[in-house]
Amino acid sequence: MTSKLVRSTVLLSSILLLASCANMKKHGSGGGYGSDSDTVGGTPLPERQDGVNFMSDNVDKHQFPPVHFAYDSYAVSPDDESTLQSVAQFLQSNQNTIIIAGFTDERGTPEYNRALGESRAEAVRDYLVHHGADGGKLQTVSFGAEMPVDPASDEDAWAKNRRAEFGVVK
Amino acid sequence: MILKKSILAICLLAFSCASAAYAADAPLITVSKSDTISLGMQPISGPDGGAISKYLESDLAATGYFTFASPGSASLIVSGQSSGGELDGKVSDHSGRSAVAGTYNGDAHARADAFANDIIQTLTGNKGIAGTRIAFAATRTGRKEIYIADFDGSDVQQLTHDNSISVGPSLSPDGRLLAYTGYKSGYADIYLVNLSTGSRDRIIKYPGTNSGAAFSPGGDRIACTLSKDGNPELYVCGLNGSAHRLTHTPGIESSPTWSPNGDEIIYSYDDHGGPQLYRISSSGGSGEHISTGFGYCTEPDWSPDGSKIAFNVRQNGSFAVAILDLRGGGTRVVAEGERPVWGPDSRHIIFSNDGTLYLMDTQSGRKKAIISGLGRASEPTWAH
């Protein structure tokens, strides 16, 4: 339940987007939105590069540490701001593309987790774009609950597995 | 397929009345053994009689409508003769009066399925589901691959050999096409497999994540979640990959499911605090919240008769299968487990629980394990 509070208070990028989309005030019952804009909620992704993906050998997955999330949340944590600032600075001073991969813990249903993992990757991407990075150099992928860093079924493992990783294209 | 059939009401009348009463209000009831029909299975004669007997009994047992007893003590006796590619099947009472009689053809499995469906329809009044197809993901090889099987778990075949992550299968209503999410490219893309020819194409491969394929009732469109515009949104795609966007929100849309006429889609939407069910026109517009009484609702599946939604809820930290009656009957939890999908009879569901797939009669609550021993099985789909 606390994750809901965290999410609703800390999603900096979404707050910025909400502020910039005046025509999004059309809440339906229970929170449905209506809008004519195709850019609500994010910046369109660039085309994929041939021969490059998060699993390929030409991607360095260890240059930056992962960032982590509360349960069922895609809000960027204040604890990870220094990591994200260094990623944003790297992108501003280099030509590399970064693939952001989103992951969830094992709980929850698989398709929802794939969407949640993607939202985590996109929330990180939004943060970076709003801190000066070029969205055209930021690709995303979600693996949902696949590929946990810790396969155990306990709170410690789940906390480690709710993450977004950075793959720097060499 | 059925050349002759004769029906005598005899002892079936009482069961038919009970069955009709269930259909009217569909409560979750504790079923006593007497609610099932007792069948005595005599071996089917003929060269492939053994195989037919095995398929027939599996079909009938899976539905939960029947119990099996020795022919001497059962209410009705099932018998048959197979020769020359034809099965003459019969169900009769102890006085020899015939309740079901027909001739069925096709291969051994098809003959058994046709006889089973005749028995189900005649004795229970419900639509037969024998021979209908399911698919699912399983980890037997150490990687998640897609498998296909009959509804009762027979005839399991491994469909993909991607050696990657292959998940989220969806069968077309006629069971001829299968769409799934595959990571062979390193990204989540939607693949389309023609099950008749075996041909496979990566049809939806936009930047970001492409997942959650659900065939339209006509089988010519796929609803799915794409993140190409910077956020997971619902789209309706042609089988050529063309994409029409339905939703425009800052939250997470996932798991679309179509109404029987294709006009509407129900899906899961997470704004701030737990995914909820929403419905939207399949041509777009604004999503409308569906009240379920639960704070976490994912992976809905719309019954083919349009009256119910099966979906996941979380309660007390664990995941359960719930059914929402769209005609005002509220929501009830029917089992522990995940990812329920309806069968063509809008009465049985298949769901996963702890790596095993179960088939359940949602009216009686009876369930049976149909897929186990393939590593962890998950994400079933059932052609309807």
Image (cartoon, helix red, strand yellow):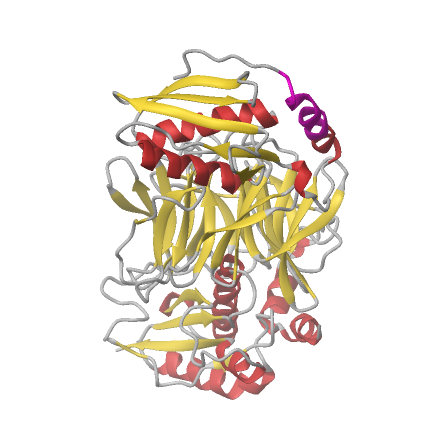
Determine whether A121 is above or below B59 in the image: below
Q: In x, y percent, where is residue B256?
A: 54, 46
Q: Is residue B167 visible?
A: no
Which residues fall within the magenta stretch?
B9-20
Residue that appears at 76% across and 40% down: B329
State yes or no: residue B13 in magenta: yes
Q: In x, y percent, where is residue A33?
A: 66, 51
Q: In x, y percent, where is residue B7?
A: 56, 14
Q: In x, y percent, where is residue A31?
A: 71, 54
Q: Is residue B49 visible?
A: yes
Please identify the quarter of the rendering in which residue B109 is found. top left
Front-most of A5 and B291? B291
Quadrant in which the N terminus of chain A is drawn: bottom right
Please identify the quarter of the rendering in which residue B273 is found. bottom right
Say how many tags the image has: 0
Query: Magenta: predominant secondary structure element?
Result: helix
Please identify the quarter of the rendering in which residue B55 is found. top left
Residue that appears at 40% across and 55% down: B137
Front-most of B22 and B68? B68
State yes or no: residue A100 in magenta: no
Q: Is residue B312 left or right of residue B383?
A: right
Front-most of B23 and B123? B123
Determine whether A159 is above or below B354 in the image: below
Quadrant in which the C terminus of chain A is drawn: bottom left
Residue that appears at 56% across and 31% down: B260
Front-most of B262 and B39? B39
